[in-house]
Image: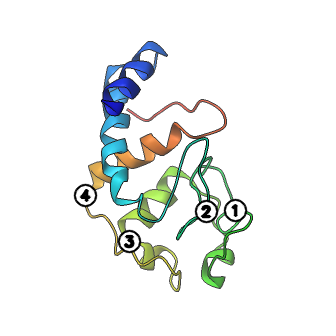
Amino acid sequence: MKVIVLATLLVAAGIGQASAQMVARGEVKFNACKACHQVGDNARNAIGPTLNGLIGRKAGSVEGYGYSEAMKNSGITWTEADLAQYIYDPKAKVAGNKMAFGGLKDKQAVSDIIDYLHTFDKAPVKLHQ
């Protein structure tokens, strides 16, 4: 039900049917991330940091979260490409990071998750098509 409501709102907001479907798929795929990460108005740091406003944010910069030295010193400012590489293989993108997740090898699922995370950006972001 939540996915249908989200997709409907995105279509109404003018994002388009294809993008709304990607976001809805991303919300479902993000369930694998929820064990450690939170998004939304009431999001808090948990096992992992909150992911609101992730794209464009400097890696290792969420206040109150205890990042690994590898993440804090990675020099990354998150782009879609960086995030896709990280979700695909976290240890290869940032060697020595503490995320226990082994990676998501389904590139469409990675893309859908990124589209979903864009819905938590501070300003509207044009989703890739």
Left or right: residue 46 versus residue 17 is right
Label pair 2/1, CB-CB below 8 angstroms: yes
Name the residue beneath numbered marker 4: 106
Image coordinates for residue 90, horizontal then vertical, percent: 43, 73
Q: Mark 2 or 3 closer to N-term?
A: 2
Kind of residue at badge 1: Val
Left or right: residue 107 versus residue 125 is left
What number is the disc on residue 89?
Answer: 3
How crowded pointer 4 is (Cα within 10 Å; few <14, some 14-19, many 20+) is rated as few
Left or right: residue 116 versus residue 97 is left
Q: Quadrant of the C terminus?
A: top left
Q: Secondary structure at mark 3?
A: loop
Q: Who's the residue at 47% across and 76% down the image? A: 99
What number is the disc on residue 90?
Answer: none
Name the residue beneath numbered marker 2: 45
Q: Mark 4 or 3 closer to N-term?
A: 3
